[in-house]
Every structure is written in structure tokens, then in C-alpha cells.
Image: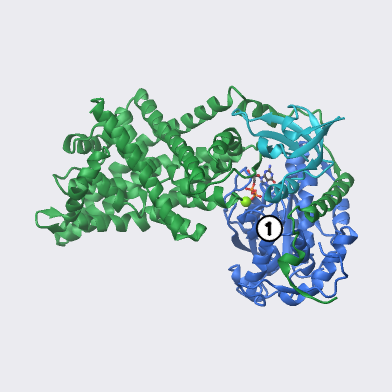
């Protein structure tokens, strides 16, 4: 098992959220989207401009900027 | 728990809701963005509110009326929200409406193709008000994707009526009207699933709730407000000032915390 | 232990570390998971993921931007190509009615000022607005709504976000800009979806750089006359469409530059967090969309024509015909503004038209025409060719004049309705004024640069 920020999760790979380091409004946003520890996340696609990246989170496709994805730690099995 | 005292008409006026007759019921449509709320609004009212396939299409509340079973209803299409722990202006508007305007019935719209994430908001809506009908919309898409949902079990788990709809084709809208009618007139008593948090939070909530009750209009859900205050949601304090005559501007509401055992502060 | 304490200090999460929030959210989600596990039988995972396949193309590294450009080009091309014929038909019909109306006034023995005010002021502006605005908008909006209903708009935001991030702005600004095509006031209200106050103000202040319903047809008309040779040939239509698409892109570019400048100066700050859901593509209900959005747009355009354009037309006719000494009021204004106008590649009349057009952008061209006509002979303006003669032969327009007028139209201050909306949304007079001054400055800067460069290069 290997830990990494969500922003480093390779495309088409799945990880499980272990912790969040975002604060304030950003943290609320991420929690509301279901990014609580234990949630499985898959990196789906990247914007043609290089950022943001779209992730599959609890059945929805959600795009996050690198800066936000940096603040989420996932473990890769 | 929400007490069943009469909602204050004065607060509703602040939301520009004026009833034509005292028998008219106020119904709110809440749900995640892009789950088909505006489409349901149109199906119920026959109006032509704009819809679009992207989250954020509806930013202002729209009102319409419909009649069913000899009574008349004011229907309010709220902006979509991922949660009621609000952050943006449109989300705050939706939250304030549910909490302070106290609709007679709230339709919590969920997307059948990703029910789990939508239940997050449905549960939060049920935390604010017990008069809820859950509408599992986009059931046609779910069927196409071969997702099946046990509606009876869902209703049993949630403790409120559940209706499956495909709003675009009008499927299930008749049943939805019937359920709204039953809930709004109290013909059907709901028993919403209660969310219990860890003992520490529960303890803090109960003591805060006790002091808060004196400060808020009757019928406003003090448990829910206490939870938000505990979480550090400042916008909810602003909303309390705006909708409660007992709290005036420029003064932080002082709360009697004497009933709380020492150390239970958050 | 009894004590009174102010609420926030005592019970609010003091460090703002959100520990309680975390636990609350986790509890709610665990209930959601529990219930979903008991009630939902998930989809067969071997199904073909069509949404994924479409997104592989529409947001792909190589095709994402070309497809976006192609769609923009195609929508505008269809609009320009399709609007031409119905515009001329409506115009010739409405102007025949004008002649008949004028005859009626004469036969009824009414004074000539009454005929002027009602027929040449009120009615002609109305007719102009309807014939020029209605056809392109009744084509553009159904097409736009089709893309919207498919679910393409969030993909645009996904593709463009990085540019907005580098400009210090919010990725959802592409969505609020999209709403601006219909009406900038609606675009400003749409900015409520942006959580961060700083980025929301940026989005509000720059929304006017999207050509709204009232300016789009102006751009199309001028492009057709000057870039497309009356759009009479397929080549002409393509050239006119390219010019309009270029304007939309120029608007996007100015938006990004302005956003960047704002986030370095008045609205200093780092981009806040950004989350955007990409919903599944949905099959649009084509028939219903076509009928609905054509009807809606028709009602919108006609509504504005009757409530704003018609009365404004009457007032402007008065300004164009009340004489102060030798000159009409409009002529005086235009004379005063002439040097400024010239420096910007325009003339005094054009600048006057933009100022008097503050109530609604739809009326800028009709005001200009009335103002030109008040100084010279009367022509019947029922075709693009007649407009070309008026502008080029009677008033010396070159393609640089046309380009600068288009740029000024694209960039200048928002209309009165939009300004009022900005006032409501920001609750601040300061931001409302800023919202008028920034675009005005941008318009002057760009037009001045273009005009002086063209002059220096001997292009006109
Ligand atoms: N297939 C299908 N599409 C629907 C249904 N309800 C809504 N839609 C579509 O879903 C999208 C979002 O609908 P809208 O009413 O704007 O959602 P809102 O954001 O919750 O108000 C639109 O493209 C609708 O046409 C439904 O029951 N079935
Ligand atoms: Mg909606």
C-alpha cells in the first residue's frame, strides 16, 4: 500500500481517500462531494489544458484543480 | 426534532411568499444540482422554467402554483445544492428557505443513477424538516443503465414516502402530487430516519439547543441550527439575525450555556 | 458553573479546523452508504461507457480545443447564413408597413412632427430591431440550447479552466459567460454559483465582454456588410462568420486579461478551490428545444423592442430633429465627440449612439442610422446594401471604422439593465461604477490601439 496526494494518482487508477488537509471553504466543498476517508476515487481524465483532472467519486465525475487535489491523500492498493 | 407549531407567515413574507388563501400550502423542491428539479417543477406547474444539463442552471428561486385534490399549492424551485452546509450564495438561499420559511412539504429530488451521493442531501433535508417526500428522478436513465432500486426498502429505511419519476416524460408525477398532498395536509405521518452523531457532539448539541430555542422563531429546527453553529458555520448566524426578530443586528446572540456540563464546549 | 458568553467565541469551532464538520459529514455519508447498499443494485460494469467515449473526444488533448472552435464556428456560421434571408424578408415587409403608416399620417392631416416621431422614430426603430435582431437570435439560441442540453457547457469549463486559473479567476466563469450570450444581466446573476466573493466579483465585472443578445446581431450585421460583402456568397458568409467568431474569441481574451489584471490589483488574491461536476450527456429533446427556445427568444426580442427600443426611438428622433441653431441636438453632441471618436477609429455619431444606447444595446445601430439620416437625405433602409451605402458612401466608413465599431460594441460599458443588476448583486455602488469604467477603458484602449496602428501602417 502506497500513499500519495490525489493529484499524483495516475489516470485510470483507483485510490482510497485516507485524509484531507484542505481547510475552510475548500474542505467543506470536498467533504460535501463525498471525499471522506474511505471513499474510493478514480482519476478519469485530464483537461486538454493540463489541469484540472476529472475524478470518479461516488458515481459522479468531478473535476478538481491540482491545488485542491494536492490536499487529499489517497492510498493505492 | 421539528415541532409542529404553525410556521410564521412573517418569515415567509421575507421570502416573498404570500398565500392567496390560508388553505394554500407551500412546497419546496430541493436536491443536488442537475437532478431534474426544474423539470419536475415544470411537470407539476405546467410552467416553462429553464432547464439545462449542467449544475448551476437555476440560481434564483422560481415560484409556481398547482392544484391537486381540491387544494392549491405554491411550489418553489430552489437552486441545486450538494449539501445544506452551505457555501455559495445560491446554496445559502436554498438552505435559508428550508430552515426558516418552513415549507408544508419538501420534495427532496435524488438522481436514481447515483443514489448514494444524493442520499447525502436527502438525509440533510430530512434533518431540517420531517415533512419530506423523496423523489427518485431520472428513473428512466437508471433503468437504461440497468440500475435497479428497491423503492419500498428505501422508503422503509428513510421513513418518508418515496416516489420514482421520469420527469421529462411525466412518469410518476401523478403519484408525486398525491404524496405531496398527503404530507402537506398531515394525512401521512412521516418518521424520518434520525441521524445520531458521536456522544460528544450530541451532548454539545443538546445544551446549545436548549439556549437557542428562546432566540429563534417557533417551528424553526433548533437541533439543526445548533449543529451548524457547532460546526462553525457563520452564515447560519447571519441567517438567524435576518429571520429572527429576537436577534437584532450588531449584537452577537448571547447564549445561556449554564446547562452544559463543563468541558462540553466544542 | 453559569456564564453568559457570546456565541461565536464560545461554541464556534475556534481553530476552524472543521473537526466537527468532518465527523458530521462522515456520519451522514455512512448512513447514505448503508441505505444505498440495501436498496440499490448497481449497474452492470461491463456496459459500454458512452459518456466516457464522448468525453475522450470532446476533452481530448488533441481534439478538445479544435472541436470547441469548430462548434463555435459552426453555430455562428449557421446563424449568419440562416439569418440573412429572413432578415431581409421581415425588413422589406415591415418597411412596406412604414410607407403605408406614413401615408396614413399624411391623409389624416397630422402634423409632420407626429409622423416623424411615430413613424420615423418609434416605428422604424421597432422595425429595425425586430428585423435585425430576431432572425439571428432565433437561430443562435436553439443551437446553443441544444449544446446546453447535451451537457457540453461543463466540458467547455473543464477545457478552459486552466486559463481562468492562471488569470486568478474561477473555472465556473466560463459557465457564467455562456449565460451572458443571452443577456449580460442574466450572466451577472448566474455568478452566484461562484462561492469565492473575490472571484465572483471578477466574473461579474467581466461578463460584459460576452456579446449579449443585443450586440450579437450588431456584430453580425457589420461583419456581413464589411467582412462578408453582404454575405451574398458562400465565401462571404464564411468570412462574416469568421469575423463574428473572432469577436467572441477577442471577448474571451479580454476577459482573461482583465481578470488577471484585477487579481493583481483591485481584487488581489489566490484562486480559491474549484470543483465542477461533469454530468452525463443526455439526449436533448430536439423538437421541444427548437420550439421552446425559438418562442422564448422571439418573446424576449419583441418584448425588449416594444418596451425599450420603441420609446427610445421616439426620444432619439426628437434629439435628431430638434434644432439648436443650425444643428440638431444629436448633431451637436456628435460634433463635440468627433475628435474623441476619430482617435478611436470611430466618429462622433458612433460614439453618441453608444452613449444614447445605454438603456439597451439593441438600439445603438438604429440610433446611429437616425443620427446619420438627420444630417442628410432620407434613404429607405430595408437592406444591407442600403446600410452599406449610408455608412460607406455617405459617411465615409472604412473597414477599420467597422472593426473599431464592432470592438467598441463588444467591449464598452454594460447596458443600464445590467448595471442595475450588478448593483443588486454586489450591493455596492463602487463595484457598479467599476463595472462601467473597466469595459469603457478596455474599449477605448483597444480601439485606440487598432485605429492608430492601422493609420501608422497606412491601412486606411
Ligand atoms: N432522461 C431524463 N432526463 C431528465 C429527467 N429529468 C430531467 N432531465 C434532464 O436533466 C437535465 C437537468 O434537469 P434540470 O431540471 O435543469 O435539473 P435541475 O438542475 O435539478 O433543475 C436536463 O437536461 C433535463 O432535460 C428525467 O426524468 N429523465
Ligand atoms: Mg434547475
Number of dots carrying numbers? 1
- Note the chain letter of the blue one: B
Residue to which mark 1 is pinned: B29
**Image point (87%, 52%), residue name:** B152
Kindly indicate the quadrant of the structure image that contains residue C384: top left
Q: Is residue C183 visible?
A: no
Q: Position of residue C61 (x, y in %)?
A: 61, 24
x then y, percent, for residue C397: 22, 35
**Where is residue C244, by image quadrant?**
top left
Is residue C43 placed above or below C262 in the rendered structure? above
CB at mark 1 closer than 8 A to ligand 1?
A: no
The tint of chain A in the picture is cyan
In which quadrant will I find the C terminus of chain C?
top left
Q: Chain of mark 1?
A: B
Name the residue at 38% across, 50% down.
C437
Residue B218 position, x and y percent, is 73, 76
Q: Is residue C389 visible?
A: yes
Amino acid at each position: 500500500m502506497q500513499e500519495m496526494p490525489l493529484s499524483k494518482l495516475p489516470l485510470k487508477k483507483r485510490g482510497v481517500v485516507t485524509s484531507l488537509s484542505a481547510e475552510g471553504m475548500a474542505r467543506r466543498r470536498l467533504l460535501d462531494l463525498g471525499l471522506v476517508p474511505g471513499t474510493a476515487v478514480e482519476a478519469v481524465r485530464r483537461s486538454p489544458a493540463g489541469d484540472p483532472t476529472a475524478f470518479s467519486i461516488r458515481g459522479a465525475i468531478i473535476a478538481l484543480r491540482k491545488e485542491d487535489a494536492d490536499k487529499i491523500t489517497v492510498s493505492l492498493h | 426534532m421539528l415541532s409542529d407549531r404553525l410556521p410564521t407567515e412573517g418569515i415567509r413574507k421575507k421570502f416573498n411568499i404570500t398565500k392567496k388563501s390560508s388553505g394554500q400550502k407551500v412546497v419546496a423542491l430541493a436536491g443536488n444540482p442537475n437532478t431534474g428539479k426544474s423539470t419536475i417543477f415544470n411537470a407539476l406547474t405546467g410552467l416553462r422554467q429553464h432547464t439545462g444539463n449542467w449544475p448551476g442552471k437555476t440560481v434564483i428561486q422560481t415560484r409556481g402554483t398547482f392544484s391537486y385534490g381540491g387544494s392549491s399549492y405554491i411550489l418553489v424551485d430552489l437552486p441545486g445544492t450538494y449539501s445544506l452546509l452551505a457555501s455559495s450564495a445560491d446554496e445559502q438561499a436554498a438552505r435559508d428557505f428550508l430552515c426558516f420559511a418552513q415549507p408544508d412539504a419538501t420534495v427532496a429530488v435524488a438522481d436514481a443513477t447515483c443514489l448514494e451521493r444524493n442520499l447525502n442531501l436527502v438525509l440533510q433535508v430530512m434533518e431540517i424538516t420531517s415533512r419530506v417526500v423523496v423523489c427518485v428522478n431520472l428513473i428512466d436513465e437508471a433503468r437504461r443503465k440497468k440500475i435497479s432500486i428497491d423503492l419500498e426498502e428505501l422508503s422503509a429505511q428513510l421513513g418518508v414516502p418515496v416516489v420514482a419519476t421520469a420527469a421529462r416524460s411525466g412518469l410518476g408525477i401523478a403519484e408525486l402530487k398525491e404524496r405531496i398532498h398527503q404530507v402537506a395536509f398531515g394525512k401521512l405521518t412521516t418518521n424520518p430516519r434520525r441521524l445520531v452523531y458521536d456522544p460528544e457532539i450530541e451532548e454539545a448539541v443538546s445544551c446549545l439547543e436548549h439556549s437557542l430555542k428562546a432566540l429563534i422563531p417557533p417551528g424553526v429546527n433548533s437541533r439543526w441550527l445548533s449543529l451548524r453553529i457547532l460546526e462553525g458555520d457563520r452564515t447560519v448566524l447571519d441567517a438567524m439575525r435576518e429571520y429572527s426578530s429576537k436577534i437584532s443586528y450588531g449584537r452577537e446572540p448571547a447564549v445561556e450555556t449554564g446547562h452544559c456540563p463543563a468541558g462540553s464546549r466544542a | 458553573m453559569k456564564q453568559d458568553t457570546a456565541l461565536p467565541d464560545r461554541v464556534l469551532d475556534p481553530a476552524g479546523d472543521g473537526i466537527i464538520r468532518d465527523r458530521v459529514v462522515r456520519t451522514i455519508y455512512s448512513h447514505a452508504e448503508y441505505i444505498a447498499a440495501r436498496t440499490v443494485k448497481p449497474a452492470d460494469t461491463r456496459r459500454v461507457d458512452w459518456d466516457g467515449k464522448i468525453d475522450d473526444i470532446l476533452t481530448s488533448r488533441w481534439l478538445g480545443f479544435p472541436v470547441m472552435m469548430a462548434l463555435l464556428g459552426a453555430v455562428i456560421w449557421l446563424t449568419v447564413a440562416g439569418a440573412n434571408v429572413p432578415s431581409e424578408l421581415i425588413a422589406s415587409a415591415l418597411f412596406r408597413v412604414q410607407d403605408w403608416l406614413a401615408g396614413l399620417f399624411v391623409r389624416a392631416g397630422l402634423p409632420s412632427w407626429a409622423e416623424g416621431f411615430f413613424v420615423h422614430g418609434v416605428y422604424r426603430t421597432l422595425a429595425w430591431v425586430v428585423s435585425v435582431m430576431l432572425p439571428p437570435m432565433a437561430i443562435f439560441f436553439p443551437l446553443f440550447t441544444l449544446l446546453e442540453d447535451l451537457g457540453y457547457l461543463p466540458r467547455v469549463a473543464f477545457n478552459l479552466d486552466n486559463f481562468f486559473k492562471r488569470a486568478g479567476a474561477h473555472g465556473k466563469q466560463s459557465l457564467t459567460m455562456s449565460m451572458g450570450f443571452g443577456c449580460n444581466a442574466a450572466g451577472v446573476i448566474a455568478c452566484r454559483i461562484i462561492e469565492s466573493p473575490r472571484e465572483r466579483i471578477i466574473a461579474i465585472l467581466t461578463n460584459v465582454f460576452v456579446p449579449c443578445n443585443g450586440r450579437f446581431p450588431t456584430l453580425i450585421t457589420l461583419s456581413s456588410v464589411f467582412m462578408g460583402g453582404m454575405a451574398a456568397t458562400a465565401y462571404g458568409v464564411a468570412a462574416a462568420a469568421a469575423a463574428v467568431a473572432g469577436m467572441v474569441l477577442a471577448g474571451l481574451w479580454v476577459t482573461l486579461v482583465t481578470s488577471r489584471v484585477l487579481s493583481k490589483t483591485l481584487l488581489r488574491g489566490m484562486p480559491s478551490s474549484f470543483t465542477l461536476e461533469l454530468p452525463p450527456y443526455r439526449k436533448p429533446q430536439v423538437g421541444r428545444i427548437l420550439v421552446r427556445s425559438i418562442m422564448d427568444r422571439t418573446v424576449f426580442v419583441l418584448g425588449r423592442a416594444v418596451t425599450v427600443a420603441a420609446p427610445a426611438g421616439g426620444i432619439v428622433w426628437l434629439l435628431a430633429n430638434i434644432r439648436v441653431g443650425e444643428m440638431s441636438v444629436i448633431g451637436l453632441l456628435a460634433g463635440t465627440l468627433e475628435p474623441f471618436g476619430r482617435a478611436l477609429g470611430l466618429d462622433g455619431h458612433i460614439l453618441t449612439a453608444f452613449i444614447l444606447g445605454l438603456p439597451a444595446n439593441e438600439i445603438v445601430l438604429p440610433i446611429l442610422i437616425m443620427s446619420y439620416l438627420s444630417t442628410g437625405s432620407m434613404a429607405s433602409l430595408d437592406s444591407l446594401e442600403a446600410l452599406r451605402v449610408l455608412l460607406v458612401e455617405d459617411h465615409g466608413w472604412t473597414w477599420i471604422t467597422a472593426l473599431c465599431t464592432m470592438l467598441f460594441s463588444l467591449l464598452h460599458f454594460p447596458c443600464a439593465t445590467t448595471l442595475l443588476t450588478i448593483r443588486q448583486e454586489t450591493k455596492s455602488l463602487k463595484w457598479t461604477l467599476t463595472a462601467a469604467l473597466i469595459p469603457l477603458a478596455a474599449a477605448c484602449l483597444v480601439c485606440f490601439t487598432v485605429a492608430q496602428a492601422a493609420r501608422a501602417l497606412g491601412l486606411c
